[in-house]
Image (cartoon, rainbow, N blue to C red):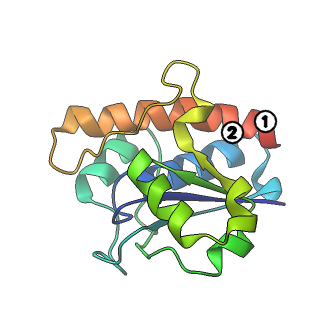
Amino acid sequence: MKRILFVCTGNICRSPTADGVARHMAAQRGLANRFEFDSAGTHAYHSGEAPDPRAQKAAYNRGYDLSYLRARPVLPEDFELFDLILAMDKGHMTWLRRECPRHLHPRLEMFLDYSASHLGRDVPDPYYGTPAEFEFVLNLCEEAIREILLQHA
């Protein structure tokens, strides 16, 4: 089983969206037993909270349920537990590299390195944005997760 962790700042917008999309797509493709997904934040601002209602609404409109997810911070043991830890932006990657034991750095990757059309870019934070920005994050998640499932199944 491949364990994948998605990481953003507060774990209420980008990373739970990726988490919910990944779980749904894996189940749809009959791959749920090959993956374990989770999401976490670099900061504990929203620990225990459900994803942002705007993220939930955008996801729900596409058939994804994020309501059961709860925010949590990245924990030291996550670096050992997860095979792949995907940062939503370069700031998250900087934080992860600082916190992660050096011998586990190969597990750290950028989320959009799995996107042909947005390779090397950050997933923009929609928190202060419009509903269209939450939709854009969903587009990015769907594209990258299709590739993640192909490469790691």
Task: Identify the mark at residue 151; answer none if there is no mark.
Answer: 1
Q: Mark 2 points at which residue?
A: 148
User: Which residue is pictured at 48% across the width and 24% down the height?
Assistant: 118
Q: The residue under label 2 is which amino acid type?
A: Ile
| Image quadrant in which the C terminus is located | top right
How far across and down, in percent of the image, does residue 108 sit? 64, 54
Apparent side of residue 121 relative to residue 19 in the rendered image (left or right): left
Q: For numbered disc 2, what is the local secondary structure?
A: helix
Q: Quadrant of residue 78?
A: bottom right
> Can residue 98 be spotted in the picture?
yes
Q: In this view, does 13 lie above or below 69?
A: above
Q: Between 121 and 13, which is closer to the camera in this rendering? A: 121
Q: Do the residues labelled 1 and 2 touch (CB within 8 Å)?
A: yes
Q: What residue type is labelled 1?
A: Gln
Cα gap from disc 1 to disc 2, whole angstroms: 5 Å
Where in the figure is residue 144, as x and y percent of width and height?
58, 34
